[in-house]
Structure formats: structure tokens, C-alpha cells
Image (spheres, helix red, strand yellow):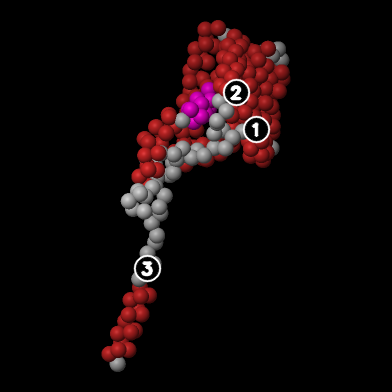
Amino acid sequence: TTTTTTTVAAKSNNKDKKPIEKESNEKTTSVTRGLLLVLRNPDALLFFFLVLMVGISSGTIENFAYVRIREVGGTGKEMGISRLVSSLAGAPMFWFSGSLGKLLGVDRILVVSLLNYVLRFLIYAGMRNPYHGLPAEALRGLTFAAFWSSCTIYAHKVSPPGLHATMLMLVNAMYGGLGQSLGAIFGGKLQHAVGTVKTFYYAASADFILVCGVVAYLGVRSASSFRNPVPLEDTKQKRESEPSSTEK
């Protein structure tokens, strides 16, 4: 009887025990060290710089495009139609943006995005009728989907371990936070000083010069991570995680 009681108690204790979860071997990277990895990587630096410049261009044109439409006699009707054209052109592109990003690479997507702003600035600067800006709005819809999806995918792929959300937040901050804010501030000061038309011409020239510089840089830099992005590695943490020769 005593043996039977002991066996039953042992089985009961075994049922009450929870399985021990295996500890994850993947080490996360601190935010500070992750930012240092970005600063030490030329491709990552160029990527975030271009995202910033696209954001500045976006902040300039999005805040003063409707001012330009008003200058040529446009009303709320033409402004609403312009936004509708942009939305209709951009919605389908989100379906094809993934394939387009794989085909061209994020570096070419960023260059195309900047060229898109060059064309949009020139169209708005030279418009004489409110409906002349519709092609510029269609361009916005077509390229923004490819730009945004490619940037988020690239940022996710190059993220150090445990910093995927942080890298995506950094992309959003560089584009929508810092970039568009600077575009609104500098664009507003320039528009007040020289007018909307010259502001758009100056912005188009600046973006075109930037595109030429980026194309020249990418042309001489053969080893680039834009085509096959890999996570930014912390070499110090990697050495610590690897077993030493004595342990082997």
C-alpha cells in the first residue's frame, strides 16, 4: 500500500511540473549599439540620408503644391481632383511594389523617387492651368508605393537582432518626422523670399544634383548591400557569442 501511494504521488508531481522552456540563443542588440552600426555602415548611412532627402522634398511639395494651384486660379474642386488622382494611381502600385523592388533594388527605387520629385517640381513650376498638375499627382501615387514598401523591407532586412521595430521607426522618423518638417520649414522660408515658382525650380535643381551624385557613387561602389541586404552585425557581440578555442 505504501509503495502504491508513493507511485501515485510521484505521478501527480510529474503532472504538476511545467515543461522548462528553452532559452533563446539569439542575442539582441541595444538601441545605442544599433545606431552605431548604422553610422559605421556606408550603405545604411546613404539609405537613411536618401530617405531624409525624399522626406524634405515631400514636405516642400506637399505644403506648397496647392498654393501653386491657387496661384493659377484653382479652387477646392481642382485640389480635391488632384488628390483623387494621386490616390487612384497609388493604390494599385502597392500590389506590385514588392516585385518592383526586387527587380530594381532599393537603391534604384530611391533614385527614381528623387527623379519623380524633380519632374513634379518642374510640372508645378511651369503649370498655367490648375489641371496641369494632374500628371504630377499621378506620379506621386505611382512612386510613393514603391518607395515606402521598398524602404520598409530594406530596413527590416538590415536590422540588427532585436531592432526591427526600431529601424522601421527610424525610417518613419527620417521621412515623415524630420524630413517633411525640414521641407515645410525651409520651403516656407524660400517661398516667402522668392515665390512658389522659383522655390520649385530650386528644389528640382537640388534633387537633380543629388541624383547625379548618388548615381556616380553607386557606379564606383561595386560591393553594395542594396541588392542583397543582410543584417548589420555587431562584431564585438558576435565574437562574444562564438565559443572560444579552449571551450572546443
Percent of width and height locating residue 91: 66, 36
Q: Specify whether residue 117 is painted magenta.
A: no
- According to the picture, the residue beneath numbered tag 3 turns out to be 18
Q: Give the range drawn in magenta.
A: 42-53
188 with respect to 7 (left or right): right
Residue at 53% from the left image edge and 22% from the top image edge: 53
Count neighbours of disc 1 (C-alpha within 10 A) and say few if under 14, some if 14 to 19, many if 20 or more: some
Q: Which of 182 and 154 is in front in this view?
A: 154
Residue at 38% from the left image edge and 75% from the top image edge: 15
Instruction: Name the image quarter holding residue 135.
Output: top right
Q: Residue 189 carries which label?
A: none
Count of residue discs: 3
**SS for dot 3:** loop
Query: Mark 2, mark 1: which one is toward the viewer?
Result: 2
- According to the picture, the residue beneath numbered tag 1 turns out to be 104
- According to the picture, the residue beneath numbered tag 2 turns out to be 219
Instruction: Name the image quarter holding residue 20.
Output: bottom left
Label 2, label 1: how far apart the Cα atoms are: 15 Å
Label 3, label 1: how far apart the Cα atoms are: 51 Å
Magenta residues: mostly which secondary structure?
helix
